[in-house]
Amino acid sequence: MVTVMELYQLLPRTNCKKCGESTCMAFAVAMLGRKKNVAECTPLLEANFKKQKEKLESLLLPAAGAEETGMIVHSELCTGCGNCVVACPVDVANDPHGAGMGCAPTNNKVIFKVVDGKVLASNIKECRRFGKNKVLCYACIDPCPTGAIEFV
């Protein structure tokens, strides 16, 4: 996962405020949080910053497909084992006799489902990492044998 410092080092570091942030460091933090994008830094659009702009875009590309919580399910790594389905505390709470028992989910309130041999995330707003009471939960990441689930 990319860090704020990696992003910051690729910025012009002029603190020009044209992006709406008070400093380039604040802009880097906003980019990492997906609140700002590379194009909002107008100095990066100049020819002399072309390489830095391309590098920033490549570093941020994996996060582009992330859900609102920052979750990415890498389907190319997922084996469909379902460990995340039964480990997710939200799935267990919302479906104690299905997902919580190691069976297929029996309702539409769960976050994870295995469909066609791959895990799909739905009801993402139910994730403990979302909303005003965010919790840094790793329950779906830790039991994944292939590292297919990531938060960015």
Image: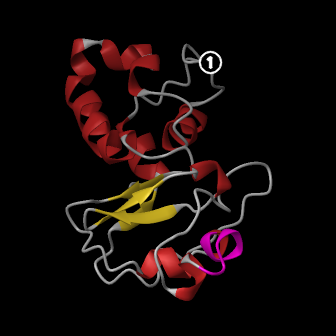
Query: Measured along the vertical axis of the image, is residue 56 above or below residue 134?
Result: above
Residue to which mark 1 is pinned: 20
Query: Measured along the vertical axis of the image, is residue 39 above or below residue 147?
Result: above
- Can you tell which quarter of the image residue 44 is in? top left
Decide which of 129, 91 is in the foreground and name it. 91
> Image check: 56 left or right of 18?
left
Horizontal and vertical percent position of residue 36:
52, 28
Query: Measured along the vertical axis of the image, is residue 122 above or below residue 136?
Result: above
Please, what is the three-letter code of the amino acid marked with disc 1? Gly
> Image check: 53 left or right of 67?
left
Residue at position x 46%, y 51% in the image: 5
Q: Is residue 41 magenta?
A: no
Horizontal and vertical percent position of residue 2:
39, 54
Decide which of 124, 135 is in the foreground and name it. 124
Residue at position x 50%, y 36% in the image: 31
Horizontal and vertical percent position of residue 63:
39, 45
Q: Secondary structure at mark 1?
A: loop
Can the viewer see residue 149? yes
Q: Which residues are magenta?
A: 91-97
Q: Is residue 95 magenta?
A: yes
Decide which of 48, 56 is in the foreground and name it. 56
